[in-house]
Amino acid sequence: MGDVSIFLQHLTNGISLGSLYALIAIGYTMVYGILRLINFAHGDIFMLGVYLTFYGVIYTPLPWWLVFILAPLLTGFIGILLEKVAYKPLRGSARITILISAIGASFLLQNLGIVIFGGRPRAFPVPQLLNHVIKLGGVSINVVTFIIPAVSILLLIGLTYFTTKTKTGLAMRALSKDYETASLMGIDINRIISITFFMGSFLAAIGGILWGSRYPQLMPLMGAMPGLKSFIAAVVGGIGNITGAVIGGFILGLGEIMLVAFLPRLSGYRDAFAFVLLIIILLVKPSGLMGNKVTEKV
Amino acid sequence: MLEVIDLHVNYGGITALRGINLTIEENQIVTLIGANGAGKSSTLRAIMGLVAKSNGKVLYKGEDFTNLPTKDIVARGIAMVPEGRRVFADLTVEENLILGAYTRSDQKAIANDIKSVYDTFPRLKERSWQKAGTLSGGEQQMLAVGRALMVNPKILMMDEPSLGLAPLLVKDIFDIINILRERGNTILLVEQNARKALEIADYAYVLETGQLVLEGPGKTLLEDQRVQEAYLGVAR
Ligand SMILES: Nc1ncnc2c1ncn2[C@@H]1O[C@H](COP(=O)(O)OP(=O)(O)OP(=O)(O)O)[C@@H](O)[C@H]1O
Ligand SMILES: [Mg+2]
């Protein structure tokens, strides 16, 4: 085993973790783009997605692949519900009020998780197909490490198509810049907001399934850390910008894995990496890597 | 066709409109003139449902529009060119036009209308793939007008469409307004350029600090001494 193959192994691990952060970060950034709201409950939506999948696979006769599709869809609808209950009634209120509601929604979901799912960790039922080790030139890698980025990239392509080529995608981009003029186009703002929450939650649930396939331990608080790091990824990339969220996710994932791999003495600071990066970005380029250029003419 | 009855608008403590009445007949050009802050934009915005009406009614062909959400008002064929262009800077010219047709689903007619907007404003055609934010101010104004036309509106409301345009383009805008009327559209025009507006208007209203002070056929108001002094810069 040469240094190159070890490096490649770390690289695939980093890309894999990075695409998970990216999938979750997209939800933060899309919602922020439309509502200028940091949806603190997003990490808990991710957790719900994983649990729904867990229960679907264990307790229903449905085949796992069908559950892997249905659970994210259901999570998407929970996202819509979250917005209607926790955010819509406060639309037009001060931002701090909505932020507090977001934090409250997060606590509520976490504690509901503990009550309903129990505090005891569960094991995610990883399908055999995703969970076997292959050998590539002396390196053994779990196929899930490849599947994660592959699925993520497919979803990103779909998302890019949606935002650039469909009428609803255009409406979403218009809405994120100018509510009033968007409504003058006849755009149904509530509908677009619902679609935004649906998509963000759907992607978070897919991220959750992939996450569970790789780190198969389920806990009601499992959304907190990935949620926080993905939020940081979104800020690093420039919150509100989807491409930025993806780039931020990969930087975070790769950085974290490489830190542990090459500076093992610092491996205890694994989680701190994200925060250090956040502080650096906020100091150097507060609007994030892909942060908004101003093109408005006065 | 469109009737505004006793419209009041408040912004917090500020009263912008204190009871105005407008009647807009089908296939007419109606203009609303007044000094800065008189409440012209507030009138249009209230009709579109963009600001809350604290009192009053809006009727369109007998249907009560007062509490209709903006998207439904647009879907029924009322479009507005907002004050200050407000194009979607991050979207291309063509995407802006496509969004103008958001409530429509007749793909063929939409494609045709995009073509006819490009015929009207060849500049926009040359720049169809450019981000709207990179257009000049005048080009953005053309886009704002073109985008509203994409609604295929029965009533088109324009809030200072000629603002910041070179004289030649101002003429273009007024020509378009005339063409639209010939095609059967109805126009409610808010203008700083009071003379031009009164010249083409079938009917005109003069607004002062939230109240109507004068109304009548455009030609009549052009002759009116008070209008001449206050809005046309004619010395006594
Ligand atoms: N969002 C707002 N909040 C508070 N006051 C407002 C708001 N919009 C307008 N106003 C006030 O309402 C009054 C009418 O404003 P409006 O924009 O309707 O005037 P206007 O006739 O369109 O003026 P202009 O020719 O300058 O465009 C003004 O006194 C203005 O300051
Ligand atoms: Mg105005």
Image (tube, rainbow, N blue to C red):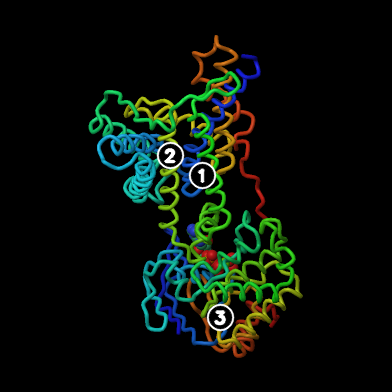
Q: Position of residue B53 (x, y in %)?
A: 40, 67
What is the distance, in whole Å, between disc 2 and disc 1 at their CAs? 10 Å
Mark 3 secondary-structure assignment? strand
> In the displayed structure, would residue B206 be above or below residue B144?
below
Report the image quarter containing ligand 2.
bottom right
Q: Position of residue A96 (x, y in %)?
A: 41, 40
Badge nearest the viewer, 2 or 3? 2
Q: Position of residue B27 (x, y in %)?
A: 54, 87
Q: Pointer 1: what residue?
A: A155
**A38, A113: nearer the viewer:** A113
Q: Residue at x 57, y 32 (%)?
A: A250
Badge nearest the viewer, 1 or 3? 1
Residue type at numbered disc 2 = Ile
Taking the image as shown, residue B16 lies to the left or right of residue A219, namely right
Q: Residue at x 31, y 47 (%)?
A: A85
Q: Pointer 2: what residue?
A: A206
**A205, A107: nearer the viewer:** A205
Q: Residue at x 49, y 84 (%)?
A: B24
Q: Pointer 3: what residue?
A: B187
**A193, B214: nearer the viewer:** A193
